[in-house]
Image (spheres, grey):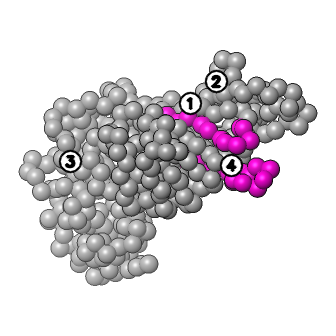
Amino acid sequence: MQKDPGKLLEKYKAGNCTEKEKAIVESWYLELVSKGNAPAAADIEISKKEVWASLAEGKTDPKKNTVWRWAIAAAILFLIGAAGLFSLKEEGTTTLTKHTLKNNDVAPGSNKAFLTLADGTKISLTDAENGEIARQQGLSIQKTANGQLVYTVDDKAAGKNSKVAFNTIETPKGGQYQINLPDGTRVWLNAASSLRYPTKFSSNTRSVTLQGEGYFEVAKISDSKARRIPFIVKTANQEVEVLGTHFNINSYDDENEVKTTLLEGSVRVSLVGNIKNGPSKLLKPGEQSQLGNQAIQVKTVDTETVMAWKNGDFVFKGEDLKSIMKKVARWYDVEVVYQGDFDHLKFAGYLSRSKNISSVLGIMESTGKVHFSVEGRKVTVLK
């Protein structure tokens, strides 16, 4: 990995950085913006010559040199614009107005969810004490201190009731949660999502229903004849069959496509109801299926960007503004309205999801291409 800042910025400008190097360069700028050190778009051209002079002098410690911090910020903002990640060519740019955002700030989401038991009992996992919160169908349901719901078999009660019962865990806007299913499968739910699952899986298949977005690490389970028991994830329009693998499904109602991204193993994606006989696609690691208009397309994607939410980050790489704001709305539990046409505005950036909403919006404002007004939980997007 390139460590010299001058050469690293040159690589970034030429588009030759590795994903890790890109993250380093862009995180430099994002860190400066979060501290109020980033220059306005109008300062970029003036600062450009000073930037490269500073790089040549070897001023490489941004913590000890204020001039270097401004130089790096101007260089990165210039390079991002040159690379087409932030569009800075149009006239009428505006300056960053972080004071307005911070005065009307919104905290990020956290571990929040509701569990609905088979008998209709609804438990707020946010308010429940850590430890065992329920017993049913030969299972003990426990909440852990780090935001997980864990099912474990209660040997003493197991087998007393063979009736199939279903539980549902759902996250609100501004919430996320992890659940360990009775078979050992682990599922991470993003904001505004739900998972319906049986408290006990059958001996020949395992099936759950997802709404919203979830990341799955499926446990490998075999039957008495040493045959793998398949695991099926159903959404409104598709079914995904796996044997034991890691994958992500994005199936929000307000998205145009259902996206299934494979990280490890293999999965078969089919239209709902056609998992056995209908048209389907078999994915390889690094591939994503996109289901829209009853057709499945497959392409190779950047899995780091797809999985950023699960890893606690926002990662945008040439993503359009409205797509970004859908993610912002879910995670910060805000309403987003638009005043103007923003269909062709795209951004790139890297930021922790633990930051307040002002940090995310401030990054986009710093390009001079968009402005945000925050009133309570309503965000207005302005030219």
Q: Which one is earlier in the sequence, the residue at label 4 or at label 3?
A: 4
Kindly report which numbered mark, 3 or 1, lies closer to the viewer in this rendering. 1
As drawn, 15 above or below 33: below
Q: Which one is earlier in the sequence, the residue at label 3 or at label 1?
A: 1
Q: Is residue 309 visible?
A: no
Local crowd size for mark 4, using a 10 Å CA cut-off: few (<14), some (14–19), many (≥20): some
Q: Which mark is residue 170?
A: 1
Q: Position of residue 280 (x, y in %)?
A: 45, 50
Q: Which residue appears at 69% of the width and 22% of the height?
A: 118
Q: Which mark is residue 229?
A: 4
Question: Circle 2 — which element?
Answer: strand
Q: Which residues are magenta?
A: 201-228
Question: Circle 3 — which element?
Answer: loop
As drawn, 98 above or below 113: below
Q: Which residue is mark 3?
A: 345
Q: Which mark is residue 357?
A: none
Question: How many angstroms separate mark 4 from mark 1 (CA)?
Answer: 26 Å
Question: How many angstroms separate mark 4 from mark 3 (CA)?
Answer: 46 Å
Q: Which residue is mark 2?
A: 116
Q: Are marks 1 and 2 in contact (CB under 8 Å)?
A: yes
